Image (spheres, grey):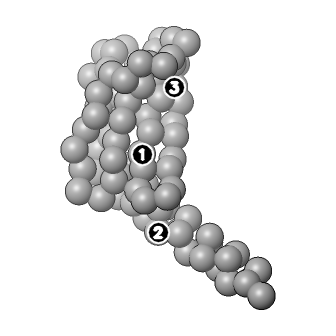
Amino acid sequence: MRTIAELPHPDCKITIFSMNQKYLIKLEKGAFEQTYKLSELDVSEGVNGVFQLLDEAFLKSVVQRFTEMRDDFNAAYQRNEP
């Protein structure tokens, strides 16, 4: 796996990788991460096409999902605390 780009964002770390003719978009916030995979053949403009996918609406949804992930994990933790 090879790192193609790291993009600055105030709410999460964004890294784009290339592996086995796929782009992997990895977004991280604290202990949580989301990874999206797409074939390089599905992106006509190469990595620049991947950048276009990361628009404001998508990133807003990603950040909201991180909040939901944290809430779900905390609730599970609370249910299983002795």
Q: Do we see residue 7 in this rendering?
A: yes
Amino acid type for the residue under numbered disc 2: Thr
Front residue (pair 16, 40): 16
State the residue position of label 2. 67
In this rendering, the answer to whether 4 lies above or below 59 is above
Q: Nearer the viewer, mark 2 or mark 3?
A: 2
Q: Amino acid at mark 1?
A: Leu
- Secondary structure beneath dot 1 equals strand
Q: Residues within 10 Å of mark 3 (few under 14, many from 20)?
A: some
Residue at x-position 33% and y-position 47%:
13
Residue located beneath label 1 in the image: 27
Q: CA distance from mark 1 to mark 3?
A: 14 Å
Residue at (42, 25) in percent of width and height: 17
Q: Residue furthest front?
A: 82
Q: Label 3 belongs to which residue?
A: 38
**What kind of residue is marked 3?**
Leu
The number of callouts visible is: 3
